[in-house]
Image (cartoon, helix red, strand yellow):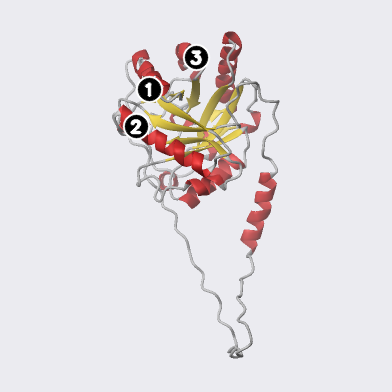
Amino acid sequence: MRSLLAFLLYVALPLVAPLLVAPPLVAQATTDTAAPKPRHKAAAPTTTARKKKTVPPPNADSIAHAREDSILDARWPVKTADQLPGAILPAKRIVAYYGNLLSKKMGVLGEYEPEEMLRKLDTEVAAWTKADPATPVQPALHLIAVVAQAAPGKDGRYRLRMDSALIERVAALAAKRNALVFLDVQVGQSNLRDELPRLAGFLARPNFHLGIDPEFSMKDGTPPGKKVGTYDAADVNYASAFLADLVTKHALTPKVLVVHRFTQHGVTNTRKITLDPRVQVVMDMDGFGPPDLKKNTFRKWIKAEPVQFAGWKQFYKPRNDSPRTTIAEILKLHPRPLYIQYQ
């Protein structure tokens, strides 16, 4: 396990009162190496000679990196059973606004008045459509329906469940844009087996889908926000099976399961995650920082450990993403992120 200092430098800790929010930006430095000076003075070119542009040879690190990338690229797309009728991915790209209507600090979903928020979502949908017209965009609202807390609460589970009225408010807003609704679960010291059944009535609706956040799954009893939590493949498999059962029981089109990840131990035993055509699993690159840092995180924990589909989180706050990774840069990634979350 990393030392506390190293952990803080890499991811920092979220603020946890009254609701948990994303941690601050971690900067990444670069080093420039001066080109070596020639030993001899070059002869002056004649009037007919052309100046040749010298290109430095690739170094060993860049060659090794390219070779490794070619190996990783071969793992994508992940081989799965044929998609069932009505499956959203990979035919469409989901662009989602994340947060909670009760907090301006947890994401864009609650930061603005509802109509302004929806107009901003329209702008992002239009931007993605213009950048990649071959992939239709499906808007979504991603509500944190179970929120990890700094205090234990009455039952000592360090989480706060949102009531049905709040979920219905988000569902009504989504209907205005024919948008999907994601219910995100931060279990604190609870677990998915205790939290998902109470959401089954909503998840049984055709346009409702699920997100699970290992950052706030505190299996060792540590309060949320003190360190990054974890899920195992067994947890992801439980969530997937839960959704698959709903699809069968209610004759639904496939559900989307978003799993947030930005550290090695955020999701363990990824090779043991089992796929089911009734559920589409998205591993969402949930980190923050400048583009190079985020792309490196994407490469290490999403690309190198393929599950099924890839996602990418964007932060509006400059303290989190400065500068924000552009849409053009994201579209150059392999695998292509098909779930984009704005916070």
Q: Are marks 2 and 1 in contact (CB under 8 Å)?
A: yes
- Tag 3 residue: 205
- Tag 2 residue: 117
Can you tell which quarter of the image residue 61 is in?
A: bottom right
For label 3, the SS is loop
Q: Earlier in the sequence, mark 2 or mark 3?
A: 2
Q: Residue at x 38, y 16 (%)?
A: 168
Q: Residue at x 46, y 48 (%)?
A: 325
- Tag 1 residue: 173
Q: Position of residue 242 (x, y in %)?
A: 56, 16
Q: Which quarter of the rendered picture does the C terminus lie within?
A: top left
Q: Residues within 10 Å of mark 3 (few under 14, many from 20)?
A: some
Where 317 sits versus 95, above or below? below
For label 1, the SS is helix
Q: Residues within 10 Å of mark 2 (few under 14, many from 20)?
A: some
Disc 2 and disc 1: Cα gap in Å? 10 Å
Disc 3 and disc 1: Cα gap in Å? 15 Å
Which residue is nearer to you in this view: 101 or 83? 83
Q: Position of residue 140 (x, y in %)?
A: 45, 28
- Badge 2 amino acid: Met
Q: Position of residue 171 (x, y in %)?
A: 40, 19
Q: Residue at x 42, y 25 (%)?
A: 177
Q: Earlier in the sequence, mark 2 or mark 1?
A: 2
Q: Are marks 3 and 1 in contact (CB under 8 Å)?
A: no
